Image: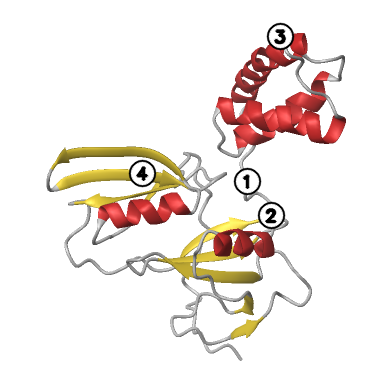
Amino acid sequence: MSTIDVSSETTVQPLQTGTVDFKLEVTILPVSDAERAKRFYASLGWREDADFVFTEDFRVLQFTPPGSEASIIFGTGVTPAGARPAGSLLLAVSDIDAARAELSERGVDVSEIFHGVAFSADGQGREPGPDPDRKSYFSYAEFSDPDGNVWLLQEVTERLPGRVAETPVATLAELLLETARQHDRFEKAAPAHDWWDWYAPYLDAREHGSTSEQAVAVADRYMKDVHGIVVQDQS
């Protein structure tokens, strides 16, 4: 027997999925020392997008994790003094072992990998080690910034259906045009090669947050390391 008494006179209609995009763009973090927070997030290898000092009492900084479409904002006068740290903020990673190793190498105190219940307030239900079956979404690790804002790493190797939006055709066309223009230099200076071998690492790097210059370096390095093709000296 159900323990929930639902009136026969009440009909619950399922809500329709929204048609307007509401993309999470920024999370605002409370910090007590903007400069210390800046050093910490820079040490993670996150991209510094902005550091605007408006007055002595108002400074806004923005950082973006590698490959993320969402950013964080913190600073001086951005949140009330003494504001409580943010709850667990989740970072999806494709390889939690590699992500944890990189953070540790950067001097971050990261927890051991665990599985089970990740979102309980008291931390109960967590089991040591990655998920035994290594199922997507079930392996975690955790670290905090100097102000106690908690970051939770979650290994995501396969997305649930409908979770990732496709790149609009117009955006993809613009990116392909950019890639072709950047490849022109390599095309003229390198030995004969298949253009798609250079395009692939460049596009992948750009879609994961690299600048155009960084993506060029990634593509050039890929061609050298994988195909042994190096841009010839044009001096």
Three-letter amino acid code of the residue under disc 3? Gln
Mark 4 element type: strand
Residue placed under numbered mark 1 in the picture: 164
Disc ID at residue 62: 4
- The answer to whether marks 4 and 1 mark residues whose Cβ atoms lie closer than 8 Å is no
Distance between the Cα atoms at labels 1 and 2?
A: 8 Å
Three-letter amino acid code of the residue under disc 4? Gln
Disc 4 or 1, which lies upstream in sequence? Answer: 4
Mark 1 element type: loop
Q: Which of marks 3 and 1 is in front?
A: 3
Disc ID at residue 25: none
* Residue furthest left in the image: 56
Judging depth in this view, the residue of 200 and 232 nearest the camera is 232
- The answer to whether marks 2 and 3 mark residues whose Cβ atoms lie closer than 8 Å is no
Left or right position of 64 against 166: left
- The answer to whether marks 1 and 2 mark residues whose Cβ atoms lie closer than 8 Å is yes
Q: In this view, does 38 lie above or below 129?
A: above
